[in-house]
Image (tube, grey):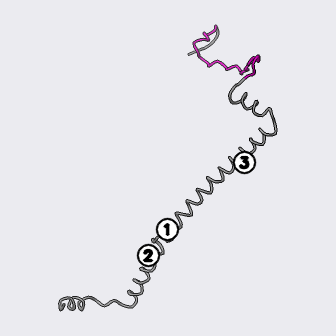
């Protein structure tokens, strides 16, 4: 044990400032990086914000669905209207007619031969 005592005597003695600074660092480490540290709290707060945003979107969807349910309960034609609009259903004996706007022909198509007086490159 004589060698250990000699080794310890050769080490420089720390000043009071360095001892207090070391103690401060040791006390701060769990505050910042521990299980309940500031960094973990910051991450958890970000996760809470994300979840709250998702929950708000879900609340809006629930309100929309509740409105649809009220509509179906109050109006007997609501289900029929929805089936016609979303599924394209028709009653027996009905004829389905769909009107569409005409599409303008593309310029320079092969279906339109050049006329006299047209200046095409």
> In front: 77, or 46?
77
Q: Is residue 104 magenta?
A: yes
Circle 2 crowding by C-alpha within 10 Å: few under 14, some 14–19, many from 20: few
Q: Which residue is mark 1?
A: 39
Please tell me which of labels 2 and 1 falls first in the chain.
Answer: 2
Looking at the image, residue 2 sits to the left or right of residue 67; the answer is left
**Quarter-of-image position of residue 121:** top right
Q: Which residues are magenta?
A: 90-115
> In front: 100, or 115?
100
Task: Indicate whether 44 appears above or below 12.
Answer: above
x 53%, y 66%: residue: 42
Circle 1 crowding by C-alpha within 10 Å: few under 14, some 14–19, many from 20: some
Task: Indicate whether 8 appears above or below 38.
Answer: below
Q: Is residue 56 magenta?
A: no
x 63%, y 9%: residue: 115
Counting from the top left corner in percent of width and height, residue 10 is at: 23, 90
Q: Which residue is mark 3?
A: 63
Please tell me which of labels 2 and 3 falls first in the chain.
Answer: 2
Counting from the top left corner in percent of width and height, residue 51 is at: 59, 56
Question: Distance of mark 2 from mark 3, alpha carbons?
Answer: 47 Å
Question: Distance of mark 2 from mark 1, alpha carbons?
Answer: 11 Å
Mostly what secondary structure, the magenta segment? loop
Q: Secondary structure at mark 1?
A: helix
x 59%, y 15%: residue: 109
Task: Indicate whether 66 appears above or below 119.
Answer: below
Counting from the top left corner in percent of width and height, residue 73 is at: 79, 40
Q: Nearer the viewer, mark 3 or mark 1?
A: 3
Q: Which residue is mark 2?
A: 29
């Amino acid at each position: 044990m004589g060698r250990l005592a000699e080794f310890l005597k050769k080490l420089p003695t720390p000043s009071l400032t360095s001892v207090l600074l070391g103690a401060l660092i040791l006390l701060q480490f769990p505050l910042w990086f521990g299980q309940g540290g500031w960094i973990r709290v910051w991450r958890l707060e970000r996760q809470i914000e994300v979840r709250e945003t998702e929950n708000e979107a879900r609340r809006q969807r629930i309100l929309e669905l509740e409105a649809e349910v009220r509509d179906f309960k109050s109006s007997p034609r609501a289900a029929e209207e929805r089936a016609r609009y979303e599924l394209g259903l028709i009653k027996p004996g009905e004829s389905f007619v769909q009107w569409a706007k005409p599409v303008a022909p593309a310029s320079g198509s092969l279906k339109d031969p050049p006329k006299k007086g047209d200046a095409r490159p």
